[in-house]
Structures are given as C-alpha cells and as structure tokens.
Image (cartoon, grey):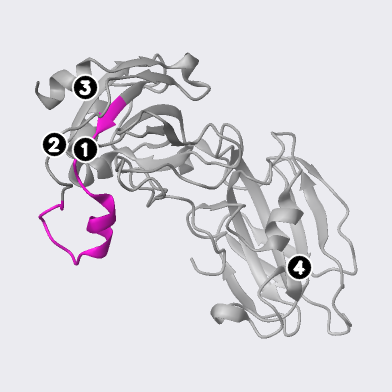
Amino acid sequence: MSSSEALDKVQVDLKGGTQVPAVSFSTPFSTDREVARVLDEGTGDSLQDSDTVLVNASIFNGENGSLVGSSYKENEQSIPIQVGRLKTIEPTIYEVMKKMKVGGSFVYSTNVSHEQQQQQSASSVRPTVEAGAPTNLEVYTVARKLPTEKDLPKYAQGTEQTPNPKLPAFSLNETTGKAELKFADDRGEAPHELVAQDLITGTGAEVNENDAVYVRYIGAQWSDGKVFDGNYDKQVANFQLNGVIKGWKQGLKGKKVGSRVELVVPAELAYGEEGQNGGPKGTLVFVVDILATVPMSPAHASAQPSQQAKEPSSASPTAIPSSLAPTADPTKQ
C-alpha cells in the first residue's frame, strides 16, 4: 500500500475543530515521504500568501495511536504561520493549505526526522527515519487569520483620562508619529510597585495574559529619562504576553483594545537593576497603545506537539515551523 493510500484510510472526527480530534488508523502507521490530505476545506476567508494564520495541531503516535500533544490541551498554544513562507519551507503543506479556507483542516505525516534536521548543519537534503519506522499523524486546523496593519487603527481610540501628574508626561504628534516622554527634573524615587494607568480607555476586547497584543509603544528608563525603544513612527509590533517582561504581562492584562496605557515597571518586573541580557536598567516607563489582541490558544498557552513516533518526548510539530511567533522582547525590535 502506498503512503497516500495509507493516509486515505485514516479516519478523523474533527469535533468541530474546537477540541482534540478523534483519529482512527491501523498501527503502526508509516510513510516513506511527506503526505497530506484535506479533511475539511473550511468556510471562512480564503488563504492568501500574505496571510499569517493561527493553526491548532494535534499529534498522534504512529506506533500505537496515542495522543502525543495538542494545542487544545490546557497550557498549550496555537501556532502562528505565514502562508507564503510554506511555499519554500513546506511545499506539501502549502499546496494543501491553498485549497483551504479559515476553519479548514488537514492530516499530515512525514518520514523527515525533525530531530536530526535540527542537529545537522544547513543542507538541502532532509534526513529521514529508517525505512518502515512508525511516523506520527498530525492533524491541523486553521483557526483564524491574524490582523495586518491595514486592519488596525493607527493609534489608541477611546475616552481620554486625566494623566497622573506624578508620572512622566506623554505626547504624540499623530501626523509624524513622533512620541515623547517628558520626565520632571524633580521626579524623585521611582515607584516601588507596578503602575498601569490609562491615558485613553478603549472599548474593545479585554487583553488576556496569554494573548498576543498588537501595539505601538515607547519605552524609557526612569533613572535618566533615556528612550531605549519605540515604534509610534514605525510598523505596528506584536508581542505574545507569555514572552515579554512580567511588567507588560501584568500591566496589560485586563486592559481593553483601544486603550493607551502608561506602565511604570519596577526593575524586578523588567530586566533588573543592571539590565540583564543587554536590556535597559532599573525602573522602566512605557506608554502602550493597544490596537488589537488575539487569543493564542483554544485552552491557554505554551507547549507544542511532537514529531516521530520513536521520539515521543519531543515537542514541536514537523509540518508547521513556529518561526513566526510574536517577538518576545519589546526592547529587541
């Protein structure tokens, strides 16, 4: 039986694309090449090369059929991918996804050894498992498109609030995008607790601690007022709150899309007094415009599923490289 015929015999109940699918197949399952099959074309928007989408994955051990990992499980995470990049990275997956829309699903298997590929130097030859070795079955569902800059407001929109006079004053030229934080010469000692003060209160969705947020921002050191980062005059940035400093995660949680938030972040919730890993030092001040927020997980966030059945302890899917996750550090843009 060919690999394609074997994949055609795999039965999948997608459970509406909202939970771990039920998969039935003869074990051990093995393929001698990359194979993929559309399970459901989906009914949402068509997928374009320029789109970045969130994909949910469930991985099943080809040797015994057991579930290895799934983004539907608690504390696991959806995978962001740019469709067009798959054309060269994973052409088999690209061809399948171009037939689908948002909400669509496919099943995939490969004999490529992801573990060996990560260990070897750059090469056009992809290492494979031994002939006849079990290979995992991977079920993917396109959950949603991620917003693009043209979908977002340029700046925060909502009800203006009275600024706290004890905090640095923020100003923005909306024509040029020039943003400034003005520190008083007699500002004194930095606050010892996290401050998260609305300058503008939006009316959109609340930010969850596991979301990816789309923002414009500026950041400065309390000690000398020196601005170390910002993008009000550049492209919108997106950050996954599970990957940023604690002050961002704690300070933006519960804030609403459309808000402009001034954060004063103590050193212990940022990069420390000495600026670990080259980060800014001491207490930091940010002003953040929250333009959108996207749930990164159907359950919540952070492990990833696995690859070959002989490598069950691994935790990253073979089909979809997760290289497009939101940048984790707002000071490293």
Specify the quadrant that holds the N terminus: top left
Residue 38 visible (yes or no): yes
Q: Are marks 1 and 4 in contact (CB under 8 Å)?
A: no
Q: Are marks 1 and 3 in contact (CB under 8 Å)?
A: no
Residue 196: in magenta span: no
Density class for disc 3 (Cα within 10 Å; few <14, some 14-19, many ≥20) is many
Residue with the mark numbered 1? 110
Amino acid carrying label 3: it is Leu
Mark 1 or mark 3: whose residue is earlier in sequence: 3
**Of residues 39 and 131, which is closer to you in this image?**
131
Amino acid carrying label 1: it is Thr
Amino acid carrying label 4: it is Val
In space, the residues marked 1 and 3 are separated at their CA atoms by 11 Å
Residue with the mark numbered 2? 33
In space, the residues marked 4 and 2 are separated at their CA atoms by 51 Å
Q: Position of residue 7 (x, y in %)?
A: 21, 22
Residue with the mark numbered 3? 7
Residue depicted at 47% across the width and 43% down the height: 149
Residue 125: in magenta span: yes
Amino acid carrying label 2: it is Arg
Q: Which residues are magenta?
A: 107-127
Tag nearer the camera, 4 or 2: 2
| Secondary structure of the residue carrying numbered label 4 | strand
Tag nearer the camera, 3 or 4: 3
Mark 1 or mark 2: whose residue is earlier in sequence: 2
**Of residues 67 and 287, which is closer to you in this image?**
67
Q: Are marks 1 and 2 in contact (CB under 8 Å)?
A: yes
